[in-house]
Image (cartoon, rainbow, N blue to C red):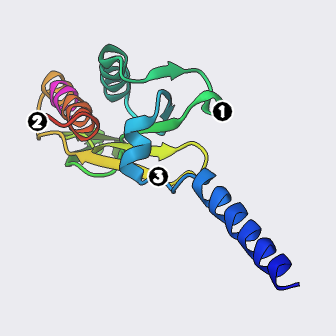
Amino acid sequence: MRSRLLVSAVGWLCLLASAAAQQKPAMTPSAKLVNARSAYLKRAGASDVAWNVISSGLEGWGRYTLVDSPEKADIIIEISQPNEGGLSVGGSNSRSTPMGEKGEETKSSTRLSAGPVKLVVYDHNSHMPLWSGTEQPKFAVKQKNREDNVVQAAQQLVTRLRQRVEPEP
């Protein structure tokens, strides 16, 4: 009877050890980011400039295969650039008629800097954030310069993501 109990206990221990050896340890966010092979790009209110720069930067990198649906992806890369933030300058003018009556009023507003460009990488299965970065484009008065600053901010985000996934020795 005692030997049966011992054999049974040893059998259970072997079974438990085998099951434990087959279980994979939970991957860290960094490991999930590095081991991902496919990515879905999600546009979450990003300007055309930020979207185009980041998506072409990720395509050119070649680290991830960009897929057309989140279900096919290991990770989801969300690109956003909210409109809030920056500096807006506004004004209004009103005209008076020759008789002194109040006429038409015009209002105008100009945004002098763009909102921050943000990149968030999520695990497809758990939706847990694996990495995020934000870059504030520099201030500029002219529209062309503002767009150039958004390009620089978006490129900087791609560079930071690349450094996180493939750090230089």
In the rendered structure, does residue 151 fall within the stretch colored magenta?
Answer: yes
The quadrant holding residue 151 is top left
Q: Which residue is mark 1?
A: 71
> Mark 1 Cα within 10 Å, few/some/many (few <14, many 20+)?
few
> Mark 2 Cα within 10 Å, few/some/many (few <14, many 20+)?
few
- Image point (51%, 56%), residue name: 26
Circle 3 SS class: loop
Mark drawn on residue 17? none
**Image position of 156 (left or right of 77):** left
- Which is more N-terminal, label 1 or label 3? 3
Start and end of the magenta stretch? 148-153
Q: Which residue is mark 2?
A: 169
- Vertical position of residue 145 compared to residue 127: above or below: above
Q: Nearest the camera: 144 or 125?
A: 125
The answer to whether mark 3 and mark 1 are in CB contact below 8 A is no
Main secondary structure of the magenta stretch: helix
- Image point (18%, 39%), residue name: 137
Q: Identity of the amino acid at label 2? A: Pro
Pinpoint residue 98: horizontal percent, then vertical percent.
Answer: 26, 38
**Which mark is nearer the camera, 2 or 1?**
2
Pinpoint residue 23: horizontal percent, then vertical percent.
Answer: 61, 54
Q: Nearest the camera: 74 or 140?
A: 74
- Vertical position of residue 107 compared to residue 42: above or below: below
> Mark 3 Cα within 10 Å, few/some/many (few <14, many 20+)?
few
Circle 1 SS class: helix
- Image point (89%, 84%), residue name: 1
Mark drawn on residue 27? 3
Mark 2–mark 1 Cα distance, whole angstroms, equals 34 Å
- Which is more N-terminal, label 1 or label 2? 1
- Which is more N-terminal, label 3 or label 2? 3
